Amino acid sequence: DRNTHWTRTVFITVGIGMFTPRKLPRADLARFEGKGLAYFVKSLEDYRDTDLLIVGGGDSAFDWCLNLEGITRSTTLIHRRDRFRAFEDSVRKVMESRVRVKTFTELGTIEGADRVEAVIVINNRTKTEERLAVSRVLACLGFSSNLGALKSWGFRVRPLSWRCVGVEEVLDFVTALQQSRPTFELPFDGGWV
């Protein structure tokens, strides 16, 4: 209602922040972003009848292998180790699918003039290189959290020194809010955000 509200305390709950995908560590590959290199899937149709390389060994990599099966012409999954951080059932399903899985394999480089046309993958044990003709690379390398925007708003952000807050204290806090008693505070042991 755009009225002015005066308060001594404002809680801004941002969790652990905004999630951004971890990018491939080589800056020279950034030129392919949006031109066949992606870190998440915006539309399944973007992958229809394509030859896809998925980089990663976690849940996202395996989920996209399964969700894009039957949409892509071919899918290859590479991972730097032979152990995965994905649900066992998803790993089993991918291993039983048409997806080609290459372990101990890392992305060397991406080739192409304007778009992704091929990749060079490297076996990290034998150091042998293999060229794969692909038109899409989906790098599922995890996400990192960031409070970026909050920091630019001019707020002082200090880490909390957490202590366990009991259920009764939380209920007292909620009750105080409902009864409009704005002087009640949760008894954190120092610090604030």
Image (cartoon, rainbow, N blue to C red):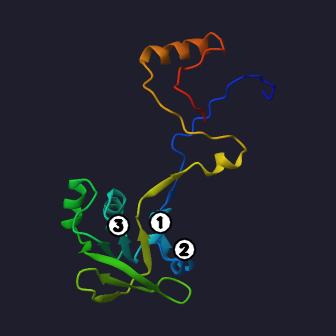
Residue holding disc 2: 33
Amino acid type of the residue that numbered disc 3 sits on in the rendered structure: Gly
Residue drawn at point x = 32 percent, y = 67 percent: 69
Q: Are marks 2 and 1 in contact (CB under 8 Å)?
A: yes
Name the residue nearer the viewer: 118 or 144. Answer: 144
Residue 80 in percent (x, y) is at: 29, 72
- According to the picture, the residue beneath numbered tag 3 turns out to be 56
Question: Amino acid under label 1?
Answer: Tyr
- Label 2, label 1: how far apart the Cα atoms are: 9 Å
In this rendering, would 166 be left or right of 191? left
Q: Which mark is residue 54?
A: none
Quadrant for the C terminus in the image: top right
Question: Closer to the N terminus: mark 2 or mark 1?
Answer: 2
SS at badge 3:
loop
Taking 135 as reference, is 105 left or right?
left
Which label's residue is closer to the chain start, 3 or 1?
Answer: 1
The local secondary structure at tag 2 comes to loop
Residue 11 is situated, as x and y percent measured from the top left of the image, at 62, 30
Query: Does dot 1 land on a helix, a strand or a loop?
Result: loop
Depth check, front residue: 98 or 156:
156
Q: Is residue 131 above or below residue 180?
A: below
Residue to which mark 1 is pinned: 39
Mark 2 or mark 3: whose residue is earlier in sequence: 2
82 and 2: which one is in front? Answer: 82
State the quadrant of the N terminus: top right
Question: Which residue is depicted at the point 55% across and 20% down?
Answer: 186
The quarter of the displayed image where residue 94 is located:
bottom left
Q: Label 3 to label 1, Cα distance in Å?
A: 11 Å
Q: Amino acid at mark 2?
A: Glu
